[in-house]
């Protein structure tokens, strides 16, 4: 347990957490919405500091990050808890269940472990929501930077502006999960708010490599109008922000049928009108390959693994010379 950052003390021993936009008011001996921050004697503590529920060496493409060191391996770690309540959560066993067995690692120990893996390029904070693991991620990320490795955040982006700005100098890449593109969807299905998530994308893409993922759920967030709104907004930031449209399958508390392949293909076609790089997740398809948006040349073949076939070492299309938004 570690004393938390970003909170204010209120009357009657209560605390307002200022880390994420839930802005929980927490009474003594109670926890916030994320179940990872607790008021103990008028001070806020991070109860998941150093607690690791899941870890492993993953391909970078699993994050998913397709334009950040393609074909590389990254040491991935996760904790417990989340500041959303998505009924379709794919990692609900660690994000929504508090009483979960974990192991304890100091930032120094986890960085030392990351450096011991041959070929590993850094640490990805993933699986559950890393932004509610803020103090641990912040301290670890600083050490990772000093060691010459890279930091990756896989996040729902639901964080206040000040703590995000403090963390961003240490982050090299983010995959930000934009759950849908309507306030109504966020309010009902995440118990959050789309505004801060959009702000996170807008701030992050100016400071590090950013890719976006949206899980498409038939009848809830997959309409052509909503996809057009999402993609036109992303294109207003950068047309070359990679977008991963991921196929929904029943999970946790949601038993709606899996999103059809036809729906995924239509969404891909719609998104491609606005964005240069669109991918389909949870689908075996050539839609996972990277093609040059200018000449159409195959750049990365991902049929089995990331096979770089058409990009020079400095991220240029070998066929036509277009600068590809990719970190090699």
Image (cartoon, rainbow, N blue to C red):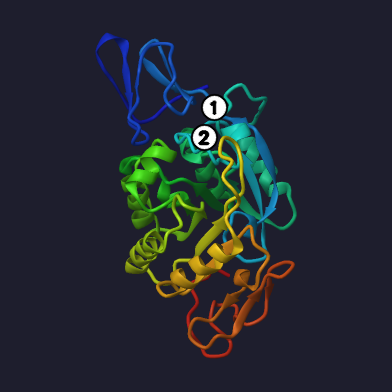
First reached walking from the N terminus: tag 2 or tag 1: 1
Left or right for 134, reference 197: right
Q: Secondary structure at mark 1?
A: loop
Q: Kindly identify the residue that appears in the image at 38 percent across and 65 percent down.
A: 228
Residue 104 % position (x, y):
65, 28
Cβ atoms at labels 2 and 1 below 8 Å apart: yes
Q: How far apart are the two marked residues, 2 and 1, measured between alpha carbons?
A: 8 Å
Query: Can you name the residue that lies furthest to the left here?
Result: 11
- Name above or below for residue 305 compared with residue 27: below
Q: Quadrant of residue 311?
A: bottom right
Q: Residue 128, which numbered label?
A: none
Which residue does the numbered mark 1 point to in the structure image?
A: 48
Report the mark closest to the observer, 2 or 1. 1
Where is residue 268 shown, x and y percent of the image?
Answer: 51, 69
**Other-residue count near label 1 (Cα within 10 Å), few / some / many at <14 / 14–19 / ≥20:** many
Looking at the image, residue 20 sits to the left or right of residue 82; the answer is left
Q: Which residue is mark 2?
A: 136
């Amino acid at each position: 347990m570690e004393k938390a950052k970003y909170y204010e003390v209120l009357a009657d021993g209560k605390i307002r957490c200022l880390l994420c936009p839930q802005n929980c008011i927490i009474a003594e001996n109670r926890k916030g919405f994320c179940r990872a921050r607790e008021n103990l004697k008028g001070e806020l503590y991070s109860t998941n500091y150093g607690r690791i529920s899941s870890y492993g060496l993953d391909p970078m493409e699993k994050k998913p990050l397709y334009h950040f060191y393609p074909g590389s391996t990254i040491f991935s770690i996760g904790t417990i808890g989340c500041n959303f309540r998505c009924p379709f959560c794919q990692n609900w066993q660690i994000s929504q269940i508090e009483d979960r067995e974990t192991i304890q690692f100091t930032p120094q120990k986890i960085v030392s472990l990351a450096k011991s893996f041959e070929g590993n390029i850094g640490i990805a904070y993933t699986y559950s929501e890393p932004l509610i693991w803020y103090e641990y991620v912040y301290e670890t990320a600083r050490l990772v930077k000093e060691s010459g490795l890279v930091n990756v955040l896989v996040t729902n982006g639901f964080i206040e502006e000040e703590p995000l700005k403090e963390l961003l100098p240490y982050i090299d890449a983010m995959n930000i999960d934009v759950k849908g593109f309507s306030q109504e969807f966020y309010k009902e299905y995440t118990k959050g708010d789309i505004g801060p998530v959009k702000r996170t994308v807008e701030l992050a893409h100016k400071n590090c490599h950013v890719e976006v993922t949206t899980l498409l759920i038939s009848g809830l967030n997959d309409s052509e109008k909503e996809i057009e709104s999402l993609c036109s907004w992303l294109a207003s930031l950068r047309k070359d922000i990679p977008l991963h449209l991921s196929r929904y399958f029943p999970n946790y508390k949601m038993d709606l049928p899996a999103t059809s392949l036809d729906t995924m293909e239509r969404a891909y076609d719609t998104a491609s009108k606005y964005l240069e790089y669109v991918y389909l997740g949870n689908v075996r398809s050539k839609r996972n390959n990277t093609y040059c948006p200018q000449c159409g040349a195959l750049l990365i073949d991902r049929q089995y693994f990331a096979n770089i076939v058409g990009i020079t070492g400095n991220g240029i299309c070998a066929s036509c010379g277009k600068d590809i938004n990719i970190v090699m």
